[in-house]
Image (tube, rainbow, N blue to C red):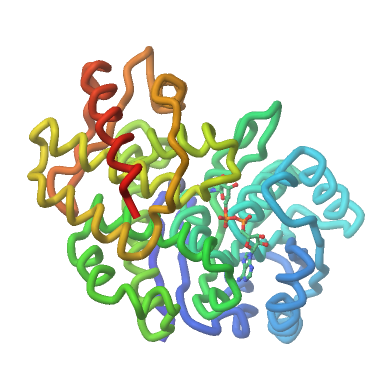
Amino acid sequence: LTKVILVKLRDRSYPLYIRADLLKQAGPLIRKAVPSRKVALVSTSFLFKTYGRSLMKSLQSSGFCADPILVPDGEIHKNEKTLFNILQKTASLRLQRDSGLISLGGGVLCDLAGLAAALYMRGIAYVQCPTTLLAQVDASIGGKTAIDFYGIKNLVGCFYQPKAVLIDPSVLVTLSERHFKTGLAELIKHGIIQDERLFRKIENNTDAILSRDLNLLPGLIARSCEIKAGIVSEDEREVGKRAWLNYGHTLGHALESYYGYRLLTHGEAIAYGMCFAAKLSAHLGVCSPSIAQRQVRLLKQVKLLRKIPRFNLEIVFRKMFLDKKARSGRILFILTRKLGLVTIKKNIPSSTIFSVLTQFQSETRKMP
Ligand SMILES: NC(=O)c1ccc[n+]([C@@H]2O[C@H](COP(=O)([O-])OP(=O)(O)OC[C@H]3O[C@@H](n4cnc5c(N)ncnc54)[C@H](O)[C@@H]3O)[C@@H](O)[C@H]2O)c1
Ligand SMILES: [Zn+2]
């Protein structure tokens, strides 16, 4: 059975459909999302070959005229050049105001194609088929689109909600181990911030999850999507509780950047960030030490805490204050109260953060 979750944003509401092998039956769902029968499918050549062909077949049997737009793979191509190449193709394919743009790929493609869909003719219908775990539980929900520009990640972009998101967990079997686990970090995060049961389910099934058991993944992904969709529905523009989703991201972003975006994946970086946030929460008495330990234990258990070379405390500390979420020199911190409940703290003295970071640094030396 297909699970349907609604992102509720008044006239911009849209469904997330979740089911193994969904892409083979995508045509009828995309018919509901796109006004005309003309669409283009943005993907990489690997993903197009592996999953795009059957998606195209389904589109064609639903009466669509569908053309592929292939783009090079990887974050380094999430830039203005690829964006304008997509736009050039949509123009030469003569997509119209009522045509649709479909993305088939990870978070990079979601962000790129979403921005292209927003810009082309001031916005055409956009449908996402996320193919990484990170994109399925995170990047494809909430309408943030962007390219990297001027050496800064996600500097240029806009909010543009898709018309539908088609999530097919069976495509995750070909994903590399590291990319799978980077998405798992966000899934665990969703448990920590909103749902103790989800957290416990992950704790109790780590082996099955790591072996990508398709009896388990669709349910976990659906619950995780429900959590993000609920938060986004209440706070589309991140003025309030959408900030919860940044749990673990203050130190996470700082470490990612410190190691030049190469040593750690995003998920590995936020896994460290979540350990730190947990530790800080316990230090401030916001949660009990055992709640913090449970988070660290799970992140260890799924092997998200890779050994990292010693980082320079001052530099990482400074980078935390450069984070987008740091307003006027104060870091906005998301802390755990208990599993399934977080709170936003604005006035933590920087000396406290520095001293907990110092302890954390020495602990990470012994971590995995
Ligand atoms: N818009 C948002 O709200 C949001 C949220 C989180 C992250 N993001 C963005 O997402 C991006 C990261 O996304 P990502 O981690 O998915 O990276 P990615 O899109 O680069 O995908 C990772 C790699 O896996 C490959 N791949 C994708 N699906 C596959 C599959 N099923 N089988 C085999 N290989 C597959 C990709 O081609 C790529 O090489 C970043 O640019 C980030 O800024 C956006
Ligand atoms: Zn993240």
Determine the image quadrant of residue 220: bottom left
Quadrant holding the C terminus? bottom left
**Relative to residue 28, is residue 338 drawn left or right?**
left
- Number of numbered discs overlaid on the protein picture: 0
Q: Position of residue 29 (x, y in %)?
A: 57, 75
Determine the image quadrant of residue 310: top left
* One can see residue 11 in this view: no
Determine the image quadrant of residue 159: top right
**Relative to residue 342, is residue 45 drawn left or right?**
right
As drawn, the residue found furthest toward the right would be: 92
Q: Dividing the image into four quarters, tell me where ligand 1 lies.
A: bottom right
Q: Residue at x 72, y 58 (%)?
A: 98
Q: Is 348 placed above or below 246 here?
A: above
**Relative to residue 31, is residue 283 drawn left or right?**
left
Q: Residue at x 52, y 50 (%)?
A: 265
As drawn, the residue found furthest toward the front would be: 366
Q: Nearer the viewer, residue 219 or 66?
A: 219
Q: Is 308 placed above or below 297 here?
A: above
Q: Position of residue 283 (x, y in %)?
A: 14, 33
Quadrant holding the N terminus? bottom left
* One can see residue 221 in this view: yes
Q: Is 270 placed above or below 104 here?
A: above
Q: Residue at x 83, y 54 (%)?
A: 90
Q: Position of residue 152 (x, y in %)?
A: 63, 29
Q: Position of residue 365 (x, y in %)?
A: 35, 42
